[in-house]
Image: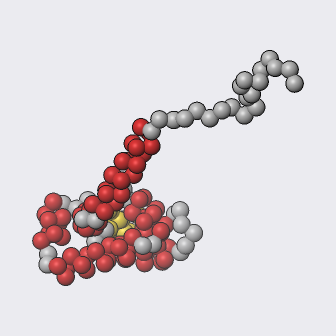
Amino acid sequence: MASGSQIVALFDQGTDADEAVLDRVFFALSDPVRRAILERLDGEALLVSELAAPFNISLQAVSRHIQVLVRAGLVQQHRTGRISRCSLLAGPIFAVAGWINRYSKYWQEQFDLLAAMLEEEVSKPRRRKPRAGSRRGKIGRKV
């Protein structure tokens, strides 16, 4: 996980740096294999071979995906000889969430509109429809 100072550093950088972070993170998140790798790293550090196990791709391909995540600042690799252990860094995800949150007002307006429409629909009096096959007024009459 990213420390508080690492997260603050992401927001203290200039506009160009912020844009570069967003570009790298969105690119990294654009691939389903990389998103799955991040999910597997949630809460634990794993060896590259452990990360590669569920995928039907080569270890080299998984390593390339991990390098994209490292360049985006989402994964940190700890190497001990030939063994490489990966852990999740959440700082860049907070930066992206902050950027996305700026646009929440647009979908919140849509939710508010939907809630108002649903409330209006619920408060309308319901008219009862006659049952199919029911013949009121004709019961007991001879034809």
From the top left corner, tell me how far across and down residue 39 is, in percent. Answer: 41, 59
Tell me if residue 128 comes above or below residue 36 in the rendering.
above
Residue 75 vs residue 108, the one in the foreground: 108
From the top left corner, tell me how far across and down residue 37 is, in percent. Answer: 43, 64
Question: Residue sitting at 32 percent across and 73 percent down?
Answer: 25
Q: Is residue 79 visible?
A: no
Tell me if residue 45 comes above or below residue 11 in the rendering.
above
Q: Is residue 127 visible?
A: yes
Q: Is residue 22 left or right of residue 46?
A: left
> Which image quadrant: the C terminus?
top right
Question: What is the tally of numbered marks visible in this picture?
Answer: 0
From the top left corner, tell me how far across and down residue 124 is, in percent. Answer: 45, 39
Residue furthest toward the right?
Answer: 143
> Which image quadrant: the N terminus?
bottom left
**Residue 90 occupies quadrant:** bottom left
Residue 104 vs residue 85, the one in the foreground: 104
From the top left corner, tell me how far across and down residue 61 is, in percent. Answer: 48, 77
Question: Residue sitting at 14 percent across and 75 percent down?
Answer: 13
**Residue 79 occupies quadrant:** bottom left
Question: Residue sitting at 18 percent across and 64 percent down?
Answer: 7
Residue furthest toward the bottom?
Answer: 16
Question: Residue sitting at 40 percent across and 43 percent down?
Answer: 120
Residue 133 vs residue 27, the one in the foreground: 133
Q: Is residue 15 left or right of residue 31?
A: left
Say how the picture is coloured: secondary structure
Tell me if residue 124 comes above or below residue 67 in the rendering.
above
**Residue 140 occupies quadrant:** top right
